[in-house]
């Protein structure tokens, strides 16, 4: 691999460029008109403008991205996360053009992208799952009887959904029919597929995921992460390893994730996501993401393994080169997502120009940002500015370090979630691991913090 096109923007584009440069790989950045002066464009060796600001006309324009790859002479494409990263059709186009796709096969993307098929694949691999429908609902199904057999509360999920989208809660039979109709309409609009399925809803659940890597023959896990602190199914902060898990639960998640990867002959980086019920100690598969996760740096922090380097190596045809016994876990890491949003105003996006930016440092601190002072935060894209990652030998020390680090961060010109994160990390519920995926909504006063 000599020349890599990064088909993304913001902090993940910067992250990929850095590792590629360390490996001696030339980087081509594709950018929209709005991102011509972005930090990623500044770091790349070549920059190609592929369209106007709206993502549908630039970063999601498959033909424009592929044309840039071909004309630049790139021999590989890394899609990052979001945008085209889990688009099997685009992966096929890249491969058909004789260019290396940095990711799993299109077939793996399709299998795991269809959440109802992925659920069935998990069952076949012996991965624990929640009660739910076998595959998507079909025309003519008696949904009232099916739902009664599963039990309430339950969730209606879009088969093509992901990232916390396409999910509707049904608390009682009275809401079932109308909620299914709404969910199907939303799924069709968001994912071009109205397929949905049912799954039991776990109240006060934790969200735990396992990072896996495979080369088609060899498979390992790189530990687990806890992503339970969320707002409206969107992750806010993450930590690794997941705290407070019984040993048998942790091992079940790790082993079954590797089993799923092996059954799918998976190649590259993937993440298997679970719900965990602390009361019953039950664990259940949610979905598998066939890409690099936003929260991958905390896995890097506790393993010392550069996940992007591993992606590029395996995409180049190399083997893993290590076994599960070679993977060592050290210390505890936390990641904080800094978004240009106003938590006190329903997380409304806050576009504008970053007039001043002071990011923290010190021992055990890493900052992955896609912006520098003077950059404009455009209203067209996800509001993530970047991530602050801390590592320490223990969770308590990592939390203390996080409080110090978040207190040092200064971002002016746009509102951010930094104030909310400072509040969350200081909570007794967070320190004692009694929070859950709906915690932020359950404590309304949290959202009154200054942005």
Image (cartoon, rainbow, N blue to C red):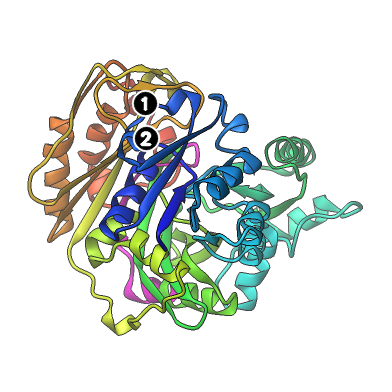
The quadrant the N terminus occupies is bottom left
Residue 378 seen in the figure: yes
327 or 380, nearer to the observer? 380
Figure check: 287 above or below 204: below
| Nearest the eye: 320 or 119 | 320
Q: Identify the secondary structure beneath mark 2.
A: helix
The alpha-carbon separation of the residues under discs 1 and 2 comes to 6 Å
> Which residue lies at the image location 45% right of the left edge and 60% below the top edge?
276
> Quarter holding the C terminus?
top left
Left or right placement of residue 27 versus residue 401 in this view = right
Where residue 395 appears, as percent x and y from the top left, is: 18, 56
Q: Residues within 10 Å of mark 2 (few under 14, many from 20)?
A: many
The secondary element bearing badge 1 is classed as loop
| The quarter of the displayed image where residue 222 is located | bottom left
**Residue drawn 46% across the image and 23% down it:** 34
Name the residue located 60 percent from the left edge and 44 percent from the top edge.
Answer: 67
The residue pinned by badge 2 equals 41
- Residue 295: tell me if it is visible: no
Q: Is residue 131 left or right of residue 405?
A: right
x and y percentages locating residue 382 in the rendered image: 47, 32
According to the picture, the residue beneath numbered tag 1 turns out to be 37
- Identify whether 17 is placed above or below 413: below
In which quadrant of the rendered view does residue 230 lie? top left
Q: Nearer the viewer, residue 144 or 29?
A: 29
In the image: residue 77, left or right of residue 87: left
Check residue 242 for magenta coloring. yes
Q: Which residues are magenta?
A: 232-252
């Amino acid at each position: 691999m000599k020349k890599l096109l990064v088909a993304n923007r913001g902090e993940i584009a910067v992250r990929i460029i850095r590792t590629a440069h360390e490996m001696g790989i030339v980087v081509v950045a594709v950018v929209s008109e709005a991102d011509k002066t972005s930090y990623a464009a500044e770091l790349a060796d070549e920059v190609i403008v592929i369209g106007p600001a709206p993502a549908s006309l630039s970063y999601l324009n498959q033909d424009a991205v592929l044309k840039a790859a071909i004309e630049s002479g790139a021999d590989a494409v890394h899609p990052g996360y979001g945008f085209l990263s889990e688009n099997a059709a685009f992966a096929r186009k890249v491969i058909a053009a004789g260019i290396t796709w940095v990711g799993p096969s299109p077939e793996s993307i399709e299998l795991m992208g269809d959440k109802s098929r992925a659920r069935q694949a998990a069952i076949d691999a012996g991965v624990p799952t929640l009660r739910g429908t076998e595959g998507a609902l079909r025309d003519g199904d008696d949904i009232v009887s099916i739902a009664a057999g599963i039990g309430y509360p339950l969730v209606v999920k879009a088969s093509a959904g992901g990232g916390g989208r396409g999910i509707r809660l049904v608390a009682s039979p009275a809401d079932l029919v109308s909620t299914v109709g709404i969910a199907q309409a939303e799924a069709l609009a968001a994912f071009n597929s109205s397929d949905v399925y049912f799954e039991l809803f776990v109240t006060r659940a934790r969200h735990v995921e396992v990072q896996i890597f495979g080369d088609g023959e060899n498979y390992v896990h790189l530990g687990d992460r806890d992503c339970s602190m969320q707002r409206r199914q969107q992750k806010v902060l993450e930590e690794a390893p997941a705290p407070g898990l019984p040993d048998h639960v942790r091992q079940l998640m790790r082993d079954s994730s590797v089993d799923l990867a092996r059954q799918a002959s998976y190649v590259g980086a993937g993440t298997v996501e679970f719900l965990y019920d602390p009361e019953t100690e039950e664990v259940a598969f949610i979905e598998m993401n066939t890409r690099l996760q936003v929260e991958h740096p905390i896995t890097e922090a506790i393993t010392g393994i550069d996940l992007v380097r591993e992606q590029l190596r395996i995409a180049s045809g190399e083997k893993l080169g290590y076994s599960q016994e070679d993977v060592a876990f050290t210390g505890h890491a936390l990641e904080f997502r800094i978004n240009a949003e106003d938590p006190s105003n329903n997380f409304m996006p806050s576009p504008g120009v970053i007039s001043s930016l002071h990011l923290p440092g010190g021992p055990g601190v890493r900052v992955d940002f896609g912006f520098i002072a003077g950059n404009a935060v455009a209203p067209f894209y996800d509001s993530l500015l970047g991530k602050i990652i801390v590592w320490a030998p223990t969770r308590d020390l990592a939390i203390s370090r996080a409080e110090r680090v978040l207190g040092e961060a200064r971002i002016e010109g746009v509102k951010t979630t930094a104030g909310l994160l400072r509040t969350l990390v200081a909570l007794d519920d967070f320190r004692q691991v009694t929070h859950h995926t709906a915690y932020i909504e359950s404590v309304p006063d949290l959202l009154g913090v200054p942005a």
